[in-house]
Amino acid sequence: MSTTVCQVTGFIVSSLGVAGCIVSTAMDMWSTQDLYDNPVTAVFQYQGLWRSCVQQSSGFTECRPYFTILGLPAMFQAVRALMIVGIVLGILGLLVCIFALKCIRIGNMEDSAKATMTLTSGIMFIIAGLCAITGVSVFANMLVTNFWMSTTNMYQGMQNVQNRYTFGSALFVGWVAGGLALVGGILMCLACKGLIPEESRYKAVSYNASGRNISYRTGPYKVGSGYEPEMKTRKGTGYEEAARSEDGRRSYPSKYDYV
């Protein structure tokens, strides 16, 4: 029962993690404009992985997608790739995990096959969670670096107007989603141990005699001289074993021999 609970819990937690990764990737607020020095502004800017948006004080929002790929930074494209890989692995892990659930029977699938599928889905969830956490962390590192560089330039008077960006809500969603996928994958790997059938390391085979136990007694061994007659007689009333004649033919007793 504990194996089933662990497996179902891992499936639910991993599903939430994968869903969170999809939501985080689709969100636009990966980086938001820092309003520390300018709390009252007519324009509020925020950016995502796929487009940048501008929100006016009137409530009107306009978003513009990135029409270029080569013009984007390499780390930015790496974050995109990590999030996509995490989503793909998470969806594949969910499909494998559905068929690996112990409470679902498909044909004559053995527990060993379910254990292998459970372990596979758990590894996929772990890799997906690590990809999401790594992608979000790389983007956060980019924001921190650009923030302090912009702050240094502003204090040195190199640039009068400089927009600084800070963490958006999508980063926190991505961190939580990656953690859930990672925990769900660990639970699936733990549930795999309970699905493996317990088998002895050495298989013992016992042989039983089909009939009665027959005991054999050893008697004295007689050494033949080599000159004993080949013809032997069988004891019985009124019957003698037929002996072979010298020319190789078998002679049968006549009716007068029994009188």
Image: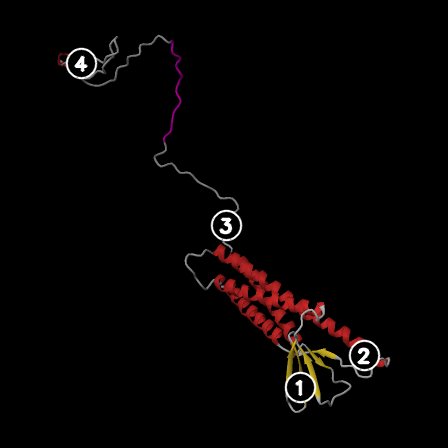
Residue at numbered disc 2 = 151
Relative to 254, say whether 22 is above or below.
below
Gap between marks 3 and 2 measured at Cα: 65 Å
* Badge 3 density bin: few <14, some 14–19, many ≥20, Cα 10 Å: few
Residue type marked 3: Glu
Residue at numbered disc 1 = 55
Residue type marked 2: Thr
Residue 188 x %, y %: 56, 62
Residue at numbered disc 4 = 253
In the rendered structure, which disc, 2 or 4, sits on the residue that comes first in sequence?
2
Left or right of 108? Residue 167 is right
Q: Identify which residue, 23 or 196, lies in the foreground.
A: 23
Callout in the foreground (1, 3):
1
Residue located 44% across and 40% down the image: 206
Q: Secondary structure at mark 1?
A: strand
Q: Quadrant of residue 215?
A: top left
In the rendered structure, which disc, 3 or 4, sits on the residue that comes first in sequence?
3
Gap between marks 1 and 2 measured at Cα: 23 Å
Q: Residue furthest right?
A: 156
In the rendered structure, which disc, 1 or 4, sits on the residue that comes first in sequence?
1
Q: Residue furthest bottom?
A: 58
Residue type marked 1: Gln
Left or right of 138? Residue 209 is left
Residue at numbered disc 3 = 199
In the rendered structure, which disc, 3 or 2, sits on the residue that comes first in sequence?
2
